[in-house]
Image: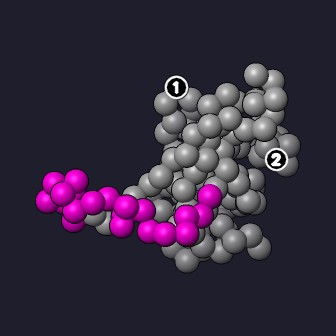
Amino acid sequence: MSDLVTRLRRHNWRITPQRRVIAETLEGSHVHYTADEVLERACERMPEISRATVYNTLNEMVALGEVIELSLQGRSKRYDPNADHDHHHLICDGCGLMKDVHAVADPIEWLPGDERHGFTVTSAAVTYRGLCPDCRAAA
């Protein structure tokens, strides 16, 4: 059984065959698929799965807090199943490739007190941008 399926079961979420295929499609390291990419991969295993089922299931997984929905400027939303591991993202400005990165320090500590404007900061998301090796070689 996949890690994501196990986490979803903890919410007493009914795991239908379609939901299982979608959850298993999201398994792996550095997975950041768009909804259409999830649909394409899920259809390889279950050709009858519908676009609405994929979109609704992704939205439910996000609402449960087991998948992170990432909105990138000018690009389709992506879905990250690593919601149970603190991490940040490295994004290629050329092709949109996204990788998980794990900071060695707490980014909340990077924000000076006078820049917090009275906020109690509870989380921080860091996005590193650049060019992946393939895009850098093509430039």
Residue 46's disc number: 2
On the image, the x and y values in percent for residue 23 come to 68, 58
- The residue sitting at 14% across, 59% down in the picture is 118
Which residue corresponds to mark 1? 74
On the image, the x and y values in percent for residue 3 come to 69, 71
Q: Is residue 43 left or right of residue 31?
A: right
- The residue sitting at 22% across, 53% down in the picture is 115
- Residue 119 visible to an observer of this rendering: yes
- The residue sitting at 52% across, 26% down in the picture is 74
On the image, the x and y values in percent for residue 26 come to 70, 55
Between residues 8 and 113, which one lies in front from this camera angle? 113
Q: Residues within 10 Å of mark 2 (few under 14, many from 20)?
A: some
Q: Residue furthest bottom?
A: 10
Color scheme of the displayed model: one colour
Q: Is residue 125 left or right of residue 114?
A: right
Between residues 106 and 86, which one lies in front from this camera angle? 106
Q: Is residue 102 magenta?
A: yes
Q: Marks 1/2: CA distance?
A: 30 Å
Q: Secondary structure of the magenta portion, mostly?
A: loop
**Which residues lie in the magenta part?**
101-120
Q: Residue furthest right?
A: 44
- The residue sitting at 62% across, 37% down in the picture is 130
Residue 67 position (above or below residue 71): below
Residue 98 position (above or below residue 27): above
Q: Is residue 84 magenta?
A: no
Secondary element type, mark 1: loop
Secondary element type, mark 2: loop
Amino acid bearing label 2:
Met
Q: Disc 1, disc 2: CB below 8 Å?
A: no
Amino acid bearing label 1:
Gly
Between residues 11 and 78, which one lies in front from this camera angle? 78
